[in-house]
Amino acid sequence: MSRRDDLIEHIRESYALVREYEEKITLSDDPREIKRSQRAVEQQKALIQGWLAELQQIGGALPADLVAAGPAAGPASPASPPAGGNRYEIHIQEAHGLAIGDGARVEMAGAAAPTPGGGDAYARYEVGLTRLLARLEARHPRRSEALVYEQRLRENLAQARFYGDTETRRAERAEIVSRLNVLAQDALGISFNELLAG
């Protein structure tokens, strides 16, 4: 399976999760469950945006089902201003492929501190994941395990970017990287940390 196919599958799964959580929000009477579901939707949307950005770099047209599903999982559209002419101001922390009309202006908030190699402080993990999956052949017996760790790490990175890094997230990331080190060493004879370094 190619990286493009992996990304498309991740996006499909996240769209399905978004629909499930939105249904929970609609049907639930429990404020805690509604709040948890809203956070889960935000996390899945952040993941989708990252995967769509990576797909855009790879190139090629999106499958029709993803094009059709796009608006449902994309950033929420702001409500139209009431007839009284009130102005609305929306601050966006990070946006990928966001189209805004009617003369709207986007001012990007400050991004995470860039690393010497470019990108933010978490970009090296994404580079390592790309290198690991590129080296694991489609039929490699450990590839599905690597894809699970990839999804867990990408979710962790998306949460760190979206909500800020915490001790819990750092500990979870260290655990995932440790497991990726073992997997990469067993499958490729090189650690994941070495793939991060290049």
Image: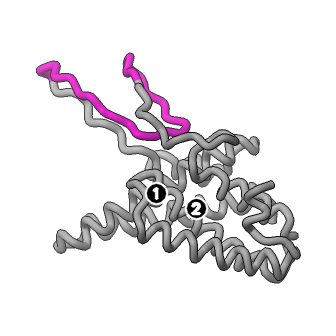
Q: Are marks 1 and 2 in contact (CB under 8 Å)?
A: no
Give the number of the mark in front: 1 or 2: 1
Q: Which residue is mark 2?
A: 154
C-alpha distance separating marks 1 and 2 = 10 Å
Amino acid type at circle 1 is Ala
Q: Which residue is mark 1?
A: 160
Magenta range: 83-105
Queried whether the magenta region covers residue 40, the answer comes back as no
Q: Quadrant of residue 96?
A: top right
Of residue 154 and residue 40, the one placed in the foreground of this image is: 154
Image point (65%, 58%), residue name:
125
Q: Quadrant of the C terminus?
A: bottom right
| Coloring basis for residues | one colour
Q: Quadrant of the N terminus?
A: bottom right
Residue 100, percent from left and from top: 43, 27
Residue 119, percent from left and from top: 62, 42
Amino acid type at circle 2 is Arg
Image point (65%, 76%), residue name:
178
Queried whether the magenta region covers residue 86, the answer comes back as yes
